[in-house]
Amino acid sequence: MTAAQIASLLSRIGESAVSAAPALPGTAGLIVGGIGAGIALAGDLITLERDPVVQINAIRDLDPDLAKLRAERERARQSAVEKAAAKAAPSTPNTP
Amino acid sequence: MSRLLPWLFVLLTFTLGAFGCGAAVEPTLVAGIADVANRGADPLLAAYKQAGDEALAKTPLTGDKAHDDAATKAALAEVDARWEPVWEAWRSLRAAELAYKTAYEKGEAPPFGSVVIAFCTFRAVLPALAKDIAEEPLLALQISAKAVCP
């Protein structure tokens, strides 16, 4: 059901309630008429607004970001291991 | 019976009205979920990066290349295992949102329930990582979850 269809449905329900309100006994007619007018107004307001579907943004695909982060992290890991190994390696004696 | 007819009409009107209002609220909620998830994306990635950096920093390096290689890989694998449910739930949420959007645009019945389930599943995996995640996006997700999740 699209927003336009919902808005149309709400407007029709509201208008039907307003037109049927006088047939109801006592204050019930007033209450139904008031609420019906409210429902019709809600339908009209939805019609006036933009279709909400254009406001649904797609959720980001994080996989490319994750792949990039993991590649950077792997480089950092290898670099740390290399540095530690170089630091621990016995320095070669500088003998002639 | 004739006295009951107007009240039956009132009942029918309000039932249809409630149904119509509920259907109108769904796209707004789905859009809200997408927005709040997207707002949380960068902080989540930053927290994941920080968790990896911290794991590397905490791993003692001996200078033995083979040992250090295995130790650092194990530390990062532990971080990845902790975070994988988040990325998996994110992928499911993204797929559910895309399915909703596509169905909605085509005028078919959009699968709102699957979006809510995916979002609540995503939200449910976050508390286990609370210490890794910055407060702000977590708070935003908690507020949204209160409105949507059972």
Image: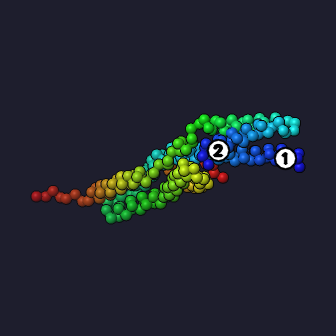
In the picture of the structure, the residue carrying the numbered disc 1 is B5
For mark 2, does the 10 Å Cα neighbourhood hold few (<14), some (14 to 19), or many (20 or more) residues?
many
Mark 1 belongs to chain: B
Rendering coords of residue A77 (x, y %): 35, 56
The quarter of the picture where the C terminus of chain A appears is bottom left
> Tag 2, which secondary structure?
helix
The residue lying toward the viewer, choosing from B119 and B106, is B106
Rendering coords of residue B37 (x, y %): 53, 47
Rendering coords of residue B114 (x, y %): 59, 55
Looking at the image, residue B83 sits to the left or right of residue B148; the answer is left
Q: Residue at x 85, y 35 (%)?
A: A27
The residue lying toward the viewer, choosing from A42 and B120, is A42
> Tag 1, which secondary structure?
helix
Q: Nearer the viewer, mark 2 or mark 1?
A: 1
Q: Which amino acid does label 1 sit on?
A: Leu
Mark 2 belongs to chain: A
Q: Both on one chain, marks 2 and 1? A: no
- Judge whether B69 appears above or below B12 on screen: below
